[in-house]
Image: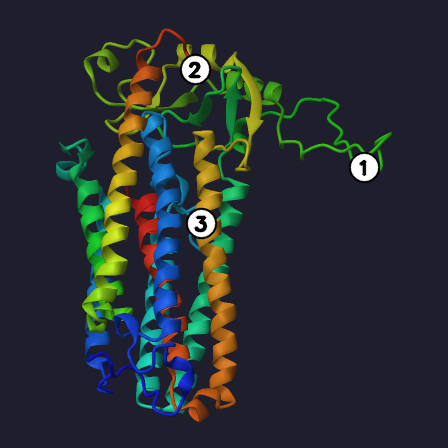
Protein backbone atom coordinates (compact mmCIF):
# COMPACT_ATOMS: atom_id res chain seq x y z
CA UNK A 1 0.00 0.00 0.00
CA UNK A 2 1.04 3.57 0.41
CA UNK A 3 3.82 3.40 2.95
CA UNK A 4 5.97 0.38 2.42
CA UNK A 5 9.02 2.33 3.63
CA UNK A 6 10.89 1.83 0.41
CA UNK A 7 12.99 4.78 -0.56
CA UNK A 8 11.59 6.56 -3.60
CA UNK A 9 14.64 8.76 -4.12
CA UNK A 10 15.23 7.60 -7.69
CA UNK A 11 11.65 8.32 -8.71
CA UNK A 12 11.83 11.76 -7.06
CA UNK A 13 14.89 12.79 -9.05
CA UNK A 14 13.39 11.42 -12.27
CA UNK A 15 10.29 13.54 -11.74
CA UNK A 16 12.46 16.56 -10.94
CA UNK A 17 14.23 16.00 -14.26
CA UNK A 18 10.92 15.80 -16.14
CA UNK A 19 9.58 18.97 -14.51
CA UNK A 20 12.82 20.84 -15.22
CA UNK A 21 12.89 19.82 -18.87
CA UNK A 22 9.25 20.86 -19.33
CA UNK A 23 9.94 24.24 -17.70
CA UNK A 24 12.97 24.81 -19.92
CA UNK A 25 10.91 23.93 -23.02
CA UNK A 26 8.16 26.31 -21.90
CA UNK A 27 10.57 29.20 -21.33
CA UNK A 28 12.33 28.45 -24.63
CA UNK A 29 9.07 28.63 -26.58
CA UNK A 30 7.88 31.60 -24.52
CA UNK A 31 10.93 33.65 -25.49
CA UNK A 32 11.17 32.46 -29.09
CA UNK A 33 7.45 32.45 -29.90
CA UNK A 34 7.90 30.53 -33.18
CA UNK A 35 5.55 32.00 -35.76
CA UNK A 36 4.45 28.61 -37.06
CA UNK A 37 2.82 27.99 -33.67
CA UNK A 38 2.05 31.51 -32.53
CA UNK A 39 0.20 32.62 -35.66
CA UNK A 40 -1.90 29.48 -36.00
CA UNK A 41 -5.20 29.10 -34.29
CA UNK A 42 -7.08 26.04 -33.07
CA UNK A 43 -10.37 26.21 -31.16
CA UNK A 44 -9.98 29.92 -30.44
CA UNK A 45 -6.43 29.72 -29.08
CA UNK A 46 -3.14 29.73 -30.92
CA UNK A 47 -1.13 26.52 -31.02
CA UNK A 48 1.61 27.96 -28.82
CA UNK A 49 -0.89 28.57 -26.02
CA UNK A 50 -2.27 25.05 -26.42
CA UNK A 51 1.27 23.74 -26.07
CA UNK A 52 1.78 25.75 -22.86
CA UNK A 53 -1.51 24.54 -21.41
CA UNK A 54 -0.80 20.90 -22.18
CA UNK A 55 2.73 21.09 -20.76
CA UNK A 56 1.33 22.75 -17.63
CA UNK A 57 -1.17 19.94 -17.17
CA UNK A 58 1.63 17.38 -17.54
CA UNK A 59 3.59 19.22 -14.85
CA UNK A 60 0.52 19.34 -12.62
CA UNK A 61 0.04 15.59 -13.09
CA UNK A 62 3.59 14.84 -11.96
CA UNK A 63 3.40 17.17 -8.97
CA UNK A 64 0.14 15.67 -7.73
CA UNK A 65 0.85 12.04 -8.54
CA UNK A 66 4.54 11.81 -7.69
CA UNK A 67 5.33 14.59 -5.20
CA UNK A 68 1.99 14.57 -3.40
CA UNK A 69 2.06 10.81 -3.74
CA UNK A 70 -1.47 10.59 -5.07
CA UNK A 71 -0.48 7.44 -6.97
CA UNK A 72 -0.03 5.68 -3.63
CA UNK A 73 -3.36 6.71 -2.11
CA UNK A 74 -6.51 4.64 -2.10
CA UNK A 75 -8.55 5.03 -5.27
CA UNK A 76 -11.49 6.43 -3.28
CA UNK A 77 -9.37 9.31 -2.03
CA UNK A 78 -7.92 9.84 -5.49
CA UNK A 79 -11.33 10.03 -7.12
CA UNK A 80 -12.84 12.16 -4.37
CA UNK A 81 -10.20 14.83 -4.85
CA UNK A 82 -9.43 14.74 -8.56
CA UNK A 83 -12.81 14.44 -10.26
CA UNK A 84 -14.69 17.27 -8.48
CA UNK A 85 -11.74 19.53 -9.25
CA UNK A 86 -11.54 18.64 -12.93
CA UNK A 87 -15.29 18.85 -13.42
CA UNK A 88 -15.74 22.18 -11.62
CA UNK A 89 -12.74 23.83 -13.26
CA UNK A 90 -13.84 22.86 -16.76
CA UNK A 91 -17.38 23.99 -15.98
CA UNK A 92 -16.18 27.34 -14.59
CA UNK A 93 -13.82 27.99 -17.47
CA UNK A 94 -16.45 27.12 -20.05
CA UNK A 95 -19.04 29.47 -18.54
CA UNK A 96 -16.73 32.41 -17.89
CA UNK A 97 -14.74 32.29 -21.11
CA UNK A 98 -17.84 31.90 -23.28
CA UNK A 99 -19.46 34.84 -21.54
CA UNK A 100 -16.31 36.95 -21.82
CA UNK A 101 -16.09 36.22 -25.53
CA UNK A 102 -19.68 37.35 -25.93
CA UNK A 103 -19.06 40.59 -24.00
CA UNK A 104 -16.00 41.23 -26.14
CA UNK A 105 -18.27 41.03 -29.21
CA UNK A 106 -20.79 43.40 -27.64
CA UNK A 107 -18.07 45.99 -26.95
CA UNK A 108 -16.51 45.59 -30.36
CA UNK A 109 -19.69 45.84 -32.39
CA UNK A 110 -21.54 48.43 -30.35
CA UNK A 111 -21.88 52.03 -31.44
CA UNK A 112 -20.52 53.27 -28.12
CA UNK A 113 -16.76 53.61 -27.90
CA UNK A 114 -15.46 52.63 -24.47
CA UNK A 115 -11.76 53.19 -24.94
CA UNK A 116 -10.34 55.80 -27.31
CA UNK B 1 -5.85 -0.70 6.93
CA UNK B 2 -2.16 -0.22 7.17
CA UNK B 3 -1.30 3.42 6.74
CA UNK B 4 1.33 5.08 8.82
CA UNK B 5 3.14 3.45 11.70
CA UNK B 6 0.32 4.20 14.05
CA UNK B 7 0.37 1.08 16.21
CA UNK B 8 0.93 2.89 19.47
CA UNK B 9 -0.50 6.31 18.80
CA UNK B 10 -4.26 6.28 19.10
CA UNK B 11 -4.60 9.79 17.69
CA UNK B 12 -4.57 8.65 14.09
CA UNK B 13 -7.38 6.17 14.40
CA UNK B 14 -10.79 7.52 13.60
CA UNK B 15 -13.76 7.01 15.95
CA UNK B 16 -14.64 3.67 14.39
CA UNK B 17 -11.47 1.93 15.46
CA UNK B 18 -8.94 0.56 13.05
CA UNK B 19 -10.75 1.20 9.79
CA UNK B 20 -9.77 4.49 8.23
CA UNK B 21 -12.01 6.07 5.60
CA UNK B 22 -10.27 6.26 2.23
CA UNK B 23 -7.24 4.59 3.74
CA UNK B 24 -5.89 7.84 5.13
CA UNK B 25 -5.54 9.30 8.59
CA UNK B 26 -7.93 12.05 9.61
CA UNK B 27 -5.32 14.80 9.31
CA UNK B 28 -4.14 13.74 5.91
CA UNK B 29 -7.64 13.39 4.50
CA UNK B 30 -8.60 16.81 5.79
CA UNK B 31 -5.43 18.28 4.32
CA UNK B 32 -6.45 16.83 0.96
CA UNK B 33 -9.92 18.32 1.18
CA UNK B 34 -8.50 21.67 2.25
CA UNK B 35 -6.23 21.56 -0.78
CA UNK B 36 -9.21 20.70 -2.98
CA UNK B 37 -11.13 23.75 -1.78
CA UNK B 38 -8.09 25.99 -2.02
CA UNK B 39 -7.46 24.73 -5.55
CA UNK B 40 -11.01 25.68 -6.46
CA UNK B 41 -10.45 29.15 -4.98
CA UNK B 42 -7.39 29.65 -7.15
CA UNK B 43 -9.27 28.25 -10.13
CA UNK B 44 -11.91 30.89 -9.53
CA UNK B 45 -9.28 33.64 -9.51
CA UNK B 46 -7.55 32.38 -12.62
CA UNK B 47 -10.86 31.89 -14.42
CA UNK B 48 -11.79 35.49 -13.51
CA UNK B 49 -8.47 36.57 -15.00
CA UNK B 50 -9.34 34.58 -18.13
CA UNK B 51 -12.76 36.25 -18.21
CA UNK B 52 -11.27 39.77 -18.14
CA UNK B 53 -8.60 38.84 -20.60
CA UNK B 54 -11.06 37.40 -23.13
CA UNK B 55 -13.26 40.45 -22.60
CA UNK B 56 -10.38 42.80 -23.46
CA UNK B 57 -8.50 40.37 -25.69
CA UNK B 58 -7.52 43.06 -28.21
CA UNK B 59 -5.88 45.36 -25.69
CA UNK B 60 -4.42 43.03 -23.04
CA UNK B 61 -0.71 43.64 -22.22
CA UNK B 62 1.84 41.21 -23.66
CA UNK B 63 3.61 39.48 -20.80
CA UNK B 64 7.04 39.32 -22.43
CA UNK B 65 7.05 43.12 -22.63
CA UNK B 66 6.09 43.57 -18.99
CA UNK B 67 8.36 41.18 -17.10
CA UNK B 68 11.78 41.85 -18.56
CA UNK B 69 13.99 42.40 -15.56
CA UNK B 70 16.88 40.35 -14.28
CA UNK B 71 19.01 41.22 -11.24
CA UNK B 72 22.24 43.14 -11.94
CA UNK B 73 21.33 43.42 -15.63
CA UNK B 74 19.82 46.84 -15.72
CA UNK B 75 18.47 47.96 -19.07
CA UNK B 76 18.79 44.50 -20.58
CA UNK B 77 15.52 43.04 -21.76
CA UNK B 78 15.45 39.52 -20.34
CA UNK B 79 11.87 38.33 -20.57
CA UNK B 80 10.96 35.35 -18.43
CA UNK B 81 14.46 34.36 -17.29
CA UNK B 82 13.90 35.52 -13.76
CA UNK B 83 10.47 34.00 -13.42
CA UNK B 84 11.89 30.75 -14.85
CA UNK B 85 14.49 30.90 -12.09
CA UNK B 86 11.71 31.37 -9.53
CA UNK B 87 9.89 28.36 -10.95
CA UNK B 88 13.04 26.27 -10.56
CA UNK B 89 13.52 27.40 -6.99
CA UNK B 90 9.99 26.35 -6.14
CA UNK B 91 10.20 23.01 -7.97
CA UNK B 92 13.50 22.30 -6.26
CA UNK B 93 12.10 23.13 -2.84
CA UNK B 94 9.30 20.69 -3.67
CA UNK B 95 11.96 18.07 -4.36
CA UNK B 96 13.69 18.66 -1.03
CA UNK B 97 10.29 18.54 0.68
CA UNK B 98 9.45 15.17 -0.85
CA UNK B 99 12.94 13.95 0.10
CA UNK B 100 12.20 15.03 3.68
CA UNK B 101 8.95 13.06 3.63
CA UNK B 102 10.82 10.09 2.21
CA UNK B 103 13.48 10.31 4.93
CA UNK B 104 10.69 10.58 7.50
CA UNK B 105 9.23 7.28 6.34
CA UNK B 106 12.59 5.73 7.12
CA UNK B 107 12.78 7.52 10.48
CA UNK B 108 16.03 9.24 9.55
CA UNK B 109 15.79 12.36 11.64
CA UNK B 110 19.01 14.02 10.46
CA UNK B 111 18.00 13.78 6.83
CA UNK B 112 14.54 15.16 7.56
CA UNK B 113 16.17 18.12 9.31
CA UNK B 114 18.51 18.80 6.39
CA UNK B 115 15.86 18.56 3.68
CA UNK B 116 13.30 20.60 5.59
CA UNK B 117 15.92 23.28 6.11
CA UNK B 118 16.63 23.40 2.37
CA UNK B 119 12.91 23.59 1.68
CA UNK B 120 12.54 26.59 3.96
CA UNK B 121 15.50 28.32 2.30
CA UNK B 122 13.95 27.70 -1.13
CA UNK B 123 10.65 29.14 0.05
CA UNK B 124 12.35 32.25 1.38
CA UNK B 125 14.25 32.77 -1.88
CA UNK B 126 10.97 32.48 -3.76
CA UNK B 127 9.13 35.00 -1.57
CA UNK B 128 12.06 37.40 -1.87
CA UNK B 129 12.08 37.01 -5.64
CA UNK B 130 8.40 37.73 -5.78
CA UNK B 131 8.90 40.90 -3.76
CA UNK B 132 11.55 41.94 -6.26
CA UNK B 133 9.17 41.26 -9.17
CA UNK B 134 6.53 43.39 -7.48
CA UNK B 135 9.03 46.19 -6.94
CA UNK B 136 9.89 46.29 -10.65
CA UNK B 137 6.24 46.04 -11.61
CA UNK B 138 5.23 48.89 -9.31
CA UNK B 139 8.14 51.10 -10.30
CA UNK B 140 7.67 50.62 -14.03
CA UNK B 141 10.26 51.26 -16.68
CA UNK B 142 9.02 53.47 -19.51
CA UNK B 143 5.98 55.40 -18.33
CA UNK B 144 2.92 56.12 -20.44
CA UNK B 145 0.12 58.60 -21.04
CA UNK B 146 -3.53 58.02 -20.31
CA UNK B 147 -6.02 59.82 -22.56
CA UNK B 148 -9.34 61.37 -21.65
CA UNK B 149 -11.04 58.30 -23.08
CA UNK B 150 -9.12 55.99 -20.77
CA UNK B 151 -6.79 54.38 -23.29
CA UNK B 152 -3.06 54.14 -22.78
CA UNK B 153 -0.37 55.59 -25.06
CA UNK B 154 3.22 54.38 -25.00
CA UNK B 155 6.16 55.78 -26.94
CA UNK B 156 8.54 54.22 -29.47
CA UNK B 157 11.39 55.54 -31.61
CA UNK B 158 11.64 55.21 -35.37
CA UNK B 159 12.87 51.61 -35.08
CA UNK B 160 9.87 50.69 -32.97
CA UNK B 161 11.83 50.33 -29.71
CA UNK B 162 10.21 51.54 -26.52
CA UNK B 163 11.26 54.97 -25.25
CA UNK B 164 10.97 56.04 -21.63
CA UNK B 165 9.38 59.35 -20.70
CA UNK B 166 12.65 60.37 -19.05
CA UNK B 167 14.41 60.09 -22.43
CA UNK B 168 12.44 62.81 -24.14
CA UNK B 169 10.23 64.80 -21.77
CA UNK B 170 11.41 68.37 -21.22
CA UNK B 171 11.54 70.26 -17.95
CA UNK B 172 9.15 73.20 -17.94
CA UNK B 173 9.25 75.89 -15.28
CA UNK B 174 6.06 74.74 -13.61
CA UNK B 175 4.82 75.04 -10.07
CA UNK B 176 4.30 71.44 -9.06
CA UNK B 177 4.54 71.24 -5.30
CA UNK B 178 3.62 67.94 -3.74
CA UNK B 179 0.89 68.41 -1.15
CA UNK B 180 2.06 66.85 2.07
CA UNK B 181 0.44 66.52 5.47
CA UNK B 182 2.62 69.26 6.87
CA UNK B 183 1.46 71.68 4.13
CA UNK B 184 -2.22 70.77 4.42
CA UNK B 185 -4.84 72.76 6.26
CA UNK B 186 -6.72 69.68 7.33
CA UNK B 187 -5.86 65.98 7.06
CA UNK B 188 -4.79 66.56 3.49
CA UNK B 189 -2.26 64.80 1.29
CA UNK B 190 -2.15 63.48 -2.25
CA UNK B 191 -0.78 60.61 -4.26
CA UNK B 192 2.83 60.95 -5.34
CA UNK B 193 3.12 63.25 -8.34
CA UNK B 194 4.48 61.69 -11.52
CA UNK B 195 7.98 62.74 -12.50
CA UNK B 196 6.70 64.69 -15.49
CA UNK B 197 3.53 66.62 -16.19
CA UNK B 198 1.38 66.04 -19.27
CA UNK B 199 2.56 69.36 -20.71
CA UNK B 200 6.20 68.34 -20.31
CA UNK B 201 5.62 65.05 -22.11
CA UNK B 202 3.73 66.80 -24.90
CA UNK B 203 6.44 69.43 -25.31
CA UNK B 204 9.10 66.70 -25.37
CA UNK B 205 7.15 64.77 -27.98
CA UNK B 206 6.94 67.88 -30.16
CA UNK B 207 10.68 68.45 -29.85
CA UNK B 208 11.48 64.89 -31.02
CA UNK B 209 9.94 64.42 -34.49
CA UNK B 210 11.10 60.77 -34.65
CA UNK B 211 8.93 59.60 -31.78
CA UNK B 212 5.71 57.69 -32.38
CA UNK B 213 2.82 56.59 -30.21
CA UNK B 214 2.10 52.94 -29.60
CA UNK B 215 -1.45 52.02 -28.56
CA UNK B 216 -2.74 49.14 -26.49
CA UNK B 217 -4.41 47.50 -29.46
CA UNK B 218 -2.88 44.26 -30.72
CA UNK B 219 -2.41 44.34 -34.50
CA UNK B 220 -4.21 41.44 -36.14
CA UNK B 221 -3.39 41.92 -39.85
CA UNK B 222 -7.07 41.92 -40.72
CA UNK B 223 -8.29 43.66 -43.89
CA UNK B 224 -9.53 46.61 -41.83
CA UNK B 225 -6.15 46.87 -40.06
CA UNK B 226 -4.22 46.76 -43.34
CA UNK B 227 -6.18 49.57 -44.94
CA UNK B 228 -6.07 51.74 -41.80
CA UNK B 229 -4.13 54.88 -42.73
CA UNK B 230 -3.50 55.88 -39.09
CA UNK B 231 -1.28 52.83 -38.49
CA UNK B 232 2.44 52.80 -39.20
CA UNK B 233 2.54 49.58 -41.22
CA UNK B 234 6.32 49.41 -41.44
CA UNK B 235 6.86 49.13 -37.71
CA UNK B 236 3.71 47.31 -36.62
CA UNK B 237 4.05 43.54 -36.57
CA UNK B 238 1.38 40.87 -36.47
CA UNK B 239 0.23 40.14 -32.89
CA UNK B 240 2.23 43.05 -31.55
CA UNK B 241 0.96 46.38 -30.29
CA UNK B 242 -0.13 48.88 -32.95
CA UNK B 243 2.24 51.77 -33.72
CA UNK B 244 0.64 54.91 -35.15
CA UNK B 245 1.85 57.34 -37.81
CA UNK B 246 3.36 60.61 -36.60
CA UNK B 247 0.29 62.65 -37.57
CA UNK B 248 -2.06 60.28 -35.75
CA UNK B 249 0.33 60.14 -32.78
CA UNK B 250 0.14 63.89 -32.34
CA UNK B 251 -3.64 63.78 -32.61
CA UNK B 252 -3.90 61.09 -29.94
CA UNK B 253 -1.44 62.81 -27.65
CA UNK B 254 -3.52 65.99 -27.73
CA UNK B 255 -6.10 63.98 -25.78
CA UNK B 256 -3.61 63.26 -22.99
CA UNK B 257 -4.88 63.59 -19.48
CA UNK B 258 -2.53 61.79 -17.09
CA UNK B 259 1.04 60.63 -16.86
CA UNK B 260 1.17 57.01 -15.70
CA UNK B 261 4.37 55.61 -14.21
CA UNK B 262 4.57 52.06 -12.96
CA UNK B 263 1.52 50.35 -11.56
CA UNK B 264 -0.99 50.65 -8.78
CA UNK B 265 -4.48 49.28 -8.27
CA UNK B 266 -6.08 52.07 -10.31
CA UNK B 267 -3.90 52.32 -13.40
CA UNK B 268 -0.66 50.96 -14.79
CA UNK B 269 1.70 51.80 -17.61
CA UNK B 270 1.46 48.35 -19.18
CA UNK B 271 -2.08 48.56 -20.53
CA UNK B 272 -5.46 47.33 -19.39
CA UNK B 273 -6.21 48.58 -15.88
CA UNK B 274 -7.43 45.17 -14.78
CA UNK B 275 -4.10 43.59 -15.63
CA UNK B 276 -2.28 45.07 -12.64
CA UNK B 277 -5.22 44.29 -10.32
CA UNK B 278 -5.14 40.64 -11.26
CA UNK B 279 -1.37 40.52 -11.10
CA UNK B 280 -1.30 41.95 -7.58
CA UNK B 281 -4.23 39.88 -6.37
CA UNK B 282 -3.32 36.48 -7.75
CA UNK B 283 0.45 36.56 -7.30
CA UNK B 284 -0.13 38.22 -3.94
CA UNK B 285 -2.51 35.51 -2.81
CA UNK B 286 -0.07 32.87 -4.01
CA UNK B 287 2.82 34.66 -2.30
CA UNK B 288 0.80 34.69 0.90
CA UNK B 289 0.42 30.92 0.56
CA UNK B 290 4.17 30.53 0.10
CA UNK B 291 4.79 32.74 3.12
CA UNK B 292 2.39 30.81 5.34
CA UNK B 293 3.89 27.59 3.96
CA UNK B 294 7.34 28.76 5.08
CA UNK B 295 5.99 29.58 8.55
CA UNK B 296 4.33 26.16 8.89
CA UNK B 297 7.50 24.50 7.57
CA UNK B 298 9.55 26.32 10.21
CA UNK B 299 7.22 25.14 12.99
CA UNK B 300 7.43 21.55 11.79
CA UNK B 301 11.19 21.93 11.33
CA UNK B 302 11.61 22.81 15.01
CA UNK B 303 9.30 19.97 16.01
CA UNK B 304 11.57 17.62 14.07
CA UNK B 305 14.62 19.15 15.74
CA UNK B 306 13.33 18.62 19.28
CA UNK B 307 12.35 15.07 18.38
CA UNK B 308 8.56 15.31 18.62
CA UNK B 309 8.00 12.95 15.70
CA UNK B 310 10.80 10.67 16.77
CA UNK B 311 8.92 10.11 20.04
CA UNK B 312 5.64 9.77 18.16
CA UNK B 313 7.35 7.18 15.95
CA UNK B 314 5.73 8.77 12.91
CA UNK B 315 6.74 11.62 10.68
CA UNK B 316 3.26 12.00 9.21
CA UNK B 317 3.17 15.67 10.19
CA UNK B 318 6.04 16.28 7.75
CA UNK B 319 4.00 14.52 5.09
CA UNK B 320 0.96 16.72 5.73
CA UNK B 321 2.87 19.98 5.60
CA UNK B 322 4.57 18.56 2.52
CA UNK B 323 1.19 18.19 0.83
CA UNK B 324 0.52 21.87 1.43
CA UNK B 325 3.95 22.83 0.15
CA UNK B 326 3.53 20.83 -3.06
CA UNK B 327 0.15 22.43 -3.53
CA UNK B 328 1.79 25.88 -3.43
CA UNK B 329 4.17 24.67 -6.14
CA UNK B 330 1.22 23.30 -8.13
CA UNK B 331 -0.57 26.65 -8.03
CA UNK B 332 2.60 28.43 -9.14
CA UNK B 333 2.84 26.17 -12.19
CA UNK B 334 -0.55 27.48 -13.29
CA UNK B 335 0.11 31.10 -12.30
CA UNK B 336 3.37 30.94 -14.28
CA UNK B 337 1.56 29.70 -17.38
CA UNK B 338 -1.36 32.08 -17.14
CA UNK B 339 0.58 35.27 -16.37
CA UNK B 340 3.88 34.78 -18.12
CA UNK B 341 3.45 32.33 -20.98
CA UNK B 342 -0.03 32.32 -22.48
Q: Position of residue A63 (x, y in %)?
A: 26, 64
Tags 2 and 3 on a common chain: no
Task: Tell which residue pokes out farthest to the top in this image.
Answer: A111
* Local SS, label 3: helix
Which numbered mark, 1 or 3, is in the foreground of this view?
3
Q: How many residues crowd mark 3 within 10 Å: few (<14), some (14–19), many (20+)? A: some
**Above or below, B90 relative to B251:** below
Determine which of the numbered discs, if any, sits on residue B283 in the image.
3
Left/right placement of residue B169 relative to residue A72 reads: right
Return the mark for residue B181.
1
- The residue identified by callout 2 is A114
Please, is residue B222 above or below residue B86 in the view? above
Q: Which mark is residue B191?
A: none
Q: B336 and A97: which one is in front?
A: A97
The reply to whether residue B78 is in sight is: no
Please give the chain letter of the residue carrying mark 1.
B
Residue in the image at 40% along x and 45% along y: B67
Q: Nearer the viewer, residue B273 or B235?
A: B273
Indicate the secondary structure of the residue bearing disc 2: loop
In the rendered image, residues at marks 2 and 1 fall on the same chain:
no
Choose mark 2 or mark 1, whichever is in front: 2
Q: Which residue is painted at 53% across and 15% down in the image?
A: B148
> Does A48 sit above or below residue B258?
below
Please state if A37 lies on the left or on the right of B93 as rendered: left
Question: Label 2 to label 3, Cα distance in Å?
Answer: 28 Å
| Chain of the residue on which disc 3 is drawn | B
Residue B160 showing in the rendered view = yes
Distance Cα–Cα, label 1 vs label 3: 33 Å
Amino acid sequence: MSHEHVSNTKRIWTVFGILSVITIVEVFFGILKPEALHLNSFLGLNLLNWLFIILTLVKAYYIVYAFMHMEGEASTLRNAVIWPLIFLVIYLLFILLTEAHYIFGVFKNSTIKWNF
Amino acid sequence: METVTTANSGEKIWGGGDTQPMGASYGKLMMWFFILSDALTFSGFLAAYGFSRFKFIETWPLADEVFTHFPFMHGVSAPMYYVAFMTFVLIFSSVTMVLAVDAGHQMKKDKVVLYMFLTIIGGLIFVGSQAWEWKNFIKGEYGAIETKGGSLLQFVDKEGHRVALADFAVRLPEERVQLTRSEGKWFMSEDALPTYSVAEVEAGFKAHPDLLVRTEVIYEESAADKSNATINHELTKHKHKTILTRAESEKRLSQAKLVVEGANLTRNEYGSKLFADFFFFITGFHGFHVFSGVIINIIIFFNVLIGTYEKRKSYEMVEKVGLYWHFVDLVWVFVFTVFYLV
